[in-house]
Image: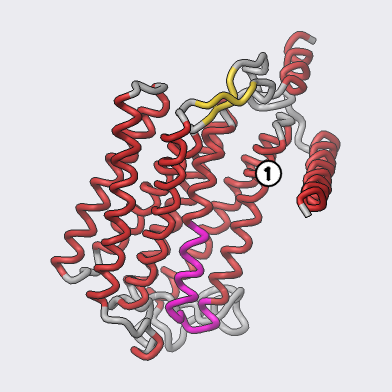
Amino acid sequence: MTQRADQEQNIFIRVFLRFFAWVHRMDAKFGLPRPVTAPSMKKQRLFAIILLACQTGITFTGSLVRVTGSGLGCNTWPQCQPGSLFPTAGTIPWIHQLIEFGNRLLTFVVAAAAVVVFIAVIRAARRPAILGLAFFQGIGIIIQAVLGGISVHMDLMWWTVAMHFLPSMLLVFLAARLVVRIGEPDDGSMQPLMPRPLQLLTNGSAASLAIVLFTGTLVTGAGPHAGDAAILPENRLQVPLIDMAHIHAGFMYLYLGVTIGLLAGVFAMNLDHRIKTAAYWVIGACLLQAAVGIMQYWLGVPRWSVPMHVIGSGIVTAATGFLWSLKARYMGGNAQLTGSTEADRQREAVLTA
C-alpha cells in the first residue's frame, strides 16, 4: 500500500510539474516584454506579503458585511440581484447592497495579487513547493468564492458561514508560509532551525489554533450577529452562547499554554533571529486578540468589536504560520538573486547583453 501511495504521489507531482512548465513556456511566449527575465527574490517576497495582506484584509471586510446585516444585500450568486450582476433599486436597502457587492469586488483584488505572485514565481522558475503554494492560493480564492455563493443561496445558515470563514484562515496560514519559503534559495539544503521537541510544540501550537478557530465559528453561529435581519433564530446554532464561549475559551487556553511553552523554549535556547521575530509577532497578536475577546465577553459582543476580533484572528493565524514555517529553512546555495539558478543565469545574461 505504501509503495502504491508513493507511486500515485509521484504521478500527481509530475502532472503539476508539467503544468508549471507549460505555464512557464506560455508566459515566455506570450507574456509582456520585459527587460529582465525574472523578478528578484526580494520583489517576489514583496508580492507575497501583499497577497498575505489581501487574504487577511478580506476577512475583515467580510466581517463588516456580517455586523451591518448586509449578508443578503446581494441575495443571489454569482449575480447580485436576479437578472443583474450589479446592485439594483428595490426592496433591499442600497447600503446593504453596496457593502455586500463591495466585498465581492474585493475578491478580484485578492485574485489579482495571487496571479501576480504566481506569474512572478513561474518567471523565476522556482522550486515545486513554492509553485504549489502560489498555485493553491489562486485555486483557494476560486473555492472561497463558490463557498460564499453557497452561503448566500442557503440564506447564511450558520454552518455555511463557518465553512466560508475557515478556508480563509487556511489561505492566510499558507500565504504566511509562502512569504517565508519564497525568500529561500532553491539550490540550498533544508536545515532544521529548531530542535525536535520545539518542532513538536510548533505543530501543537498550529493544531490547537485550528481548533480555536473552529470553535470560534461556533460562537459566531450561536451569537447575535446572523448577517441579515431576515435570518430566523431557528437557523442559528441551537446552543447557548455562554456555553460556546466557554468552550472556545478553553481551547484558547490550550493554544496559549502550548504556545507559551514553545516561546519559552525559543528564547531560552536563543534560536535564530527570524524565529525570535516571528515569536514576537505571535506574542503581540495573542495579547491583542485576548484583549478583544475578553472585552467582547464582558460587553456582550458589541457589533463594532466583531471586525476587530476577525482581523485579530487573521493576524494570529499569519504569525503562527510564520513561526510554523521556520521549523526548518533552505539555507546556503548560490541562487541569491531570483531564488533559482536557472533564472539567475537568464537574468545575468540579459543584464550583460
Question: What x and y, as percent, mark residue 257?
Answer: 29, 47
- Magenta stretch holds residue 254: no
Segment tinted magenta in the rendering: 151-168
Question: Which image quadrant: the N terminus?
Answer: bottom right
Q: Is residue 195 above or below residue 14?
A: above
213 sits to left or right of 187: left
Question: What x and y, as percent, mark residue 149?
Answer: 57, 74
| Residue occupying the point 18% across, 66% down | 297
Residue furthest to the left in view is 298
| Residue occupying the point 45% across, 28% down | 195
Q: Is residue 92 above or below residue 295?
A: below
Q: What count of labels does the image hold? A: 1
* Residue 121 location, quadrant: top right
Which amino acid, mark 1? Gly
* Residue 342 location, quadrant: top right
- Magenta stretch holds residue 160: yes
Tell me the chief SS of the magenta region: helix
| Residue occupying the point 41% across, 43% down | 320
* Label 1: which secondary element: helix
Question: Which image quadrant: the C terminus?
Answer: top right
Q: Residue beneath label 1, please?
A: 132
Q: Is residue 90 above or below residue 181?
A: below
273 sits to left or right of 49: left
Question: What x and y, as percent, mark residue 264?
Answer: 29, 33
Mark 1 is surrounded, within 10 Å at the Cα level, by few (under 14), some (14 to 19) or many (20 or more) other residues, namely some
Q: How is the image coloured?
A: secondary structure
Residue furthest to the front in view is 1
| Residue occupying the point 55% across, 52% down | 110
Question: What x and y, as percent, mark residue 143?
Answer: 62, 63
292 sits to left or right of 67: left
